[in-house]
Amino acid sequence: MHPNCAKLHFWGVRGSIPTLDRGMWRYGGNTPCLDLIAPDGTRFVLDCGTGLRTLGNQWANMEGDRPIQAHIFVTHYHWDHIQGIPFFRPFYMPQNDFRFYSFQSKYLGRDSLRQVLEAQLARPYFPVDLTLMPSGRQFSEIKGGDQFDINGTKVFTRWLNHPQGCLGYRFETSAGTIVYATDNEPGVPEMDENLRQLASGADILINDAQCSPEQLASSRKGWGHSSWLESVKLARECGVKNLVLFHHDPDSNDRVVDGYLYAARQEFANTWAATDGMGASLSESRADFHLRPSRLGQRRPVHFSATVSGQSREGARFQEYAVLKEMNLRGGYLWLSHLPQLQSQMDIRVECGTPEHPNCLVLRGSVVHCDVGQERDRVGVGVVFVDETETALPLD
Ligand SMILES: [Zn+2]
Ligand SMILES: [Zn+2]
């Protein structure tokens, strides 16, 4: 790791309930969970949705018998933010130690988070009880407006507008600032101001973008969520460097999320759509995003001449002739002279006819991977093909 680098990982990005639908595999179906590793190595977990299981498996495999310590911040007690807790493997290992942070719910009273955890493991909801979870667990009760320091990372909290309450968190590390503001709805002036204070000048702002702007104005008003449009306005107003659209609706398939991302990037270029397995390295306030390897099945070497149309990292359209080097039915790999934007759409037009019978195959993909400098001055680009049965996005 770079000596002064913070690492952020998304393990769950879906709101409300996990999804396993075929049309949602690119963005993923786990409910909210992120981890942030501060430059000094301190571990933070943000929310405990079903993504927590994958994070726990990774830590347990990586650390073996070495002790794991982490500070776990829960934004609120809705199912999608707590349901991963019983499935976090490091809780079942005695050498590990965790400190939880959340607020006192008026419905639960003192020790709200401890009660939530115990209730999840109570009979008849779960097969094992707390005695089989030997890791250390401490609970800190916090509230909106708090400010404290954890090993050099400054943490700020604010109340957000969400039914039964929700906390937003701002983490100021020596490598840059990350703001986690899930589950919030605009429209209450005091809470809107809280959100602006949290987001001000953030290097990475993760904001709720569950609804379309139309839903937010009608059928979803009062549900406690936001939209890509509100997220973009907030990011612009607060001088944010990178915006991550988060808490995707369980009924939004990949093409719907593609559409929100496309619309948001027209207004605010440095926008990303949170994806299970996505990560960002933050160093000197510069964020580098990457997606998880998404290759399913072996790729076959091919040699197809193609005309590629896409969008560069600077936002400009480009077109170039290239050779498709490898592919399977899910995606392909090619070398380009342009550096395309991650998560942008690309059309690959493969000439496959004969001079007498010209024909072509147009493959539409989403850029998931860029290897700079792999082959002389070329960029190795991985794409996954998108499902064209859903509404296509305009390329221009
Ligand atoms: Zn939620
Ligand atoms: Zn909620």
Image (tube, rainbow, N blue to C red):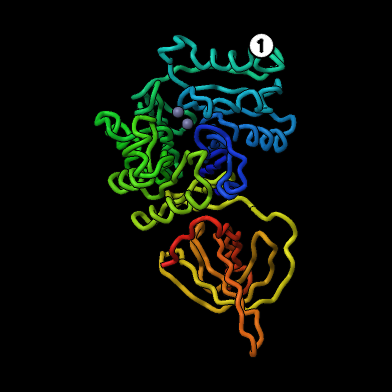
Considering only vertical position in the picture, is 151 above or below 101? below
Residue most extreme to the left: 189
Residue at left 46%, top 41%? 246
Where residue 314 sits in the image (x, y, percent)? 42, 65
Number of labels in the image equals: 1
Q: Secondary structure at mark 1?
A: loop
Q: Nearer the viewer, residue 83 or 1?
A: 83
Mark 1: few, some, or many residues within 10 Å (few <14, many ≥20)? few
Whether residue 52 can be seen here: yes
Residue at left 39%, top 30%? 223
On-image quarter of the C terminus:
bottom left
Residue at left 57%, top 28%? 70
Quarter location, residue 163: top left
Residue most extreme to the bottom: 356
Query: In the rendered view, does 315 fall on the left or right side of 18?
Result: left
Quarter location, residue 156: top left
Give the residue number, with chain letter if any, for mark 1: 123
Residue most extreme to the top: 110
Residue at left 38%, top 50%? 241
Quarter location, residue 52: top right
Label 1 within 8 A of ligand 2 by Cβ = no
Where residue 180 sits in the image (x, y, percent)? 43, 36
Where residue 257 sits in the image (x, y, percent)? 48, 49
Query: In the rendered view, does 189 fall on the left or right side of 332?
Result: left
Where residue 375 sits in the image (x, y, percent)? 63, 72
Amino acid under disc 1? Arg
Whether residue 40 can be seen here: no
Ligand 2, image quadrant it occupies: top left
